[in-house]
Image: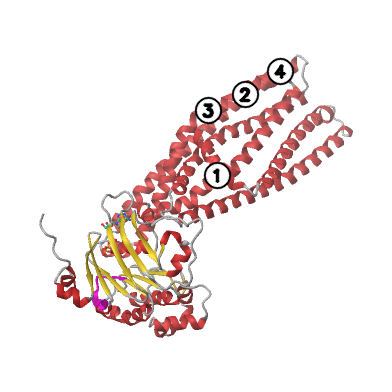
Amino acid sequence: MREVRAAFRRFWPLTRGDRRRLAVIVACVVVAALAETASILLFAELTDHALRAGSLAAFWGPAGAWLGVAVLGALVGYLGNSLATWTAERFVLRLRAGVFRHVQTLPPHFFQRHRRGDLVERLTGDVEAIEQMVVSGVVGTVSAAFSAVFYAAAALYLRWDLALVTFVLAPLFLLAARRFSGRIKEASTDERAADGAITSVVEEALGNVVLTQAYNRRGAEEARLDREARAWMRASVRGARLSELYEQFVEVVETLCVLAVIGLGVWEISAGRMTLGQLLAFAAFIGYLYPPVRSLGQLGLTLTAATAGARRLGELLDARPAVTDPAVPVTPGPVRGWVAFHDVTFRYPETDRPALDGLAFAARPGELVVVTGPSGAGKSTLAKLLTRFYDPAAGAIRLDGVPLPALGLDFLRDQVTLLPQETLILHGTIRENITAGRPGASGTEIERAARAAAAHAFVTALPDGYDTVIAPGTAALSGGQLKRLTIARAMLRASPVLVLDEPTAGLDGIAARQVVQPLRRLMSGRTTLMITHDLTLAPDADRILVLDGGRLVEQGTHPELIARGGTYARLALTGRPAPALPG
Ligand SMILES: Nc1ncnc2c1ncn2[C@@H]1O[C@H](COP(=O)(O)OP(=O)(O)OP(=O)(O)O)[C@@H](O)[C@H]1O
């Protein structure tokens, strides 16, 4: 119950803006319950005055009133339910948008540590589970509570002594619900986790379809899905069985209660202390009273099941972004592109070895700095720090003399364009893919960027030209062509600093050569940090940094470093790092 309260406290504020609507829903629910109560009392009147007496004259009055009450109940029922659905969906919309907004700010290591399918499940299934608790849960509780109170009051009004007997039995339902809730929660936690695992397996298998087929791993993937699907099936069947068991148990208890009332009633009628109409109405109230009491018990079960989703969503919301915007960002004039690393040390969360250790260098506006070194040296980490995915643990990074954390994040990322290792393609047209660099760019600007990226010719050769729809993993274009589209996208950005992470990675010799000219055009006039193992462009560099184990081990121009005969010379000549020294 403590967990339910905590989850409720966390997510209830999201109903702000809809509270008045919730009040209207509650009012509708109350009026509907009142109408139901009135119709049962009218039924008693009809039985006693019209039916038993066989009097048509006594029929019209209560019949008309009953019809009126039924129409009123139908109207408010419709209004209340429509409003409740609308409010519940709005809640889901708001919650999902909020969680999605938060997830988008999380650092790269968060996404490496969580399976994507599981995150998808949290943003879909778990979000809906919380709605069940917060909106539908509240409306359901209020509706059940008011109905129970009205029916109980009417039963007391008809026969207080009989009513008290039936009330004594009501807590049985709540006791039963309590007994079942722990086990149902366990089953639904397992079910939610298994849902996430299934989505992950399907997502991963579809993403890796080439590996699956080429290495004959279809059987293994099917077995993986089967394992997760069976876990889901077990949890789902267990949950359904428990709910069904609870339902049936409650059904029997309810029958017992109704029989007890009828038995007592027959006795009362035989003694002349009760009319048939009263007994029928009384039995109807009992029949009506137990379902809301039962749903109050059931609600406890729904709530405990929803806390499983709330906990999973809470984990997402509790993950903190690695960097935040400054309260009052510095807004410098036009950035020229001075980049300086001052003794920068950085360690990824939960690792003990620094990925960068005391790194210091500077780049002047328009300079090309090539960063090379063996795998795992910290090169990509340097790119992540300059684009501020993380802040250094020690030291500082400055852009035009301003420490990066003092600049607004959006501003910084407008100044520093990152071309990451992977060719990132959006689902959309080629035009949309290029304009992602600068939304609102004109057709002429797009074409100019595409020409500079040597992409215009192959794009216009496509039947749909710039309107060709492409998607991640598309086969419509080659790896080199897609790379040139991403260069065109970067070209559109008027940013003074450029970070290229392995721009020729994954391209063969010819494709790599085809991107060299576009890259030169892209780099011209911009301060560029090019991270690469491919040293084709190294002779153009104003400076080459050689990293190893997170440290800067050599620095200089191509001829200087070749003459020195160290790590760089070995990398340039053999493409391989120097062998590690023994000891
Ligand atoms: N998200 C992460 N969590 C923990 N450690 C990480 C993470 N990313 C990188 N590392 C570690 O940091 C070190 C530097 O990694 P980095 O990716 O910067 O190397 P790199 O020089 O770019 O390598 P490569 O040339 O293979 O791309 C490595 O030891 C790596 O294992």
Which x, y percent locates residue 374?
Answer: 21, 64
Instruction: List the residue tagged with mark 3.
Output: 176
Residue closest to the eye, 210 or 332: 332
Crowding at mark 4 (Cα within 10 Å: few <14, some 14-19, many 20+): few
Q: Secondary structure at mark 2?
A: helix
Q: Amino acid at mark 2?
A: Cys
Crowding at mark 1 (Cα within 10 Å: few <14, some 14-19, many 20+): some
- The answer to if 12 sits in the magenta stretch is no
Marks 2, 4: nearer the viewer: 4
Crowding at mark 2 (Cα within 10 Å: few <14, some 14-19, many 20+): many
Which x, y percent locates residue 65?
Answer: 83, 38
Closer to the chain start, of discs 2 and 3, is 3
Residue depicted at 67% across the width and 49% down the height: 83
Closer to the chain start, of discs 3 and 1, is 1
CA distance separating discs 2 and 1: 38 Å
Q: Secondary structure at mark 3?
A: helix
Residue depicted at 36% across the width and 58% down the height: 204
Q: Is residue 176 left or right of residue 366?
A: right
Residue lying farthest to the left in this orientation:
582
Res 257 label: 2
Q: Secondary structure at mark 1?
A: helix
The quadrant of the rendered image in which ligand 1 is seen is bottom left
Instruction: List the residue tagged with mark 4.
Output: 161
Residue closest to the eye, 497 or 214: 497
Q: Is 453 situated above or below 570?
A: below
Q: Amino acid at mark 4?
A: Asp
Q: Is residue 441 left or right of residue 222?
A: right
Instruction: List the residue tagged with mark 1.
Output: 11
Which x, y percent locates residue 120?
Answer: 45, 54
CA distance separating discs 3 and 1: 28 Å
Q: Amino acid at mark 1?
A: Phe
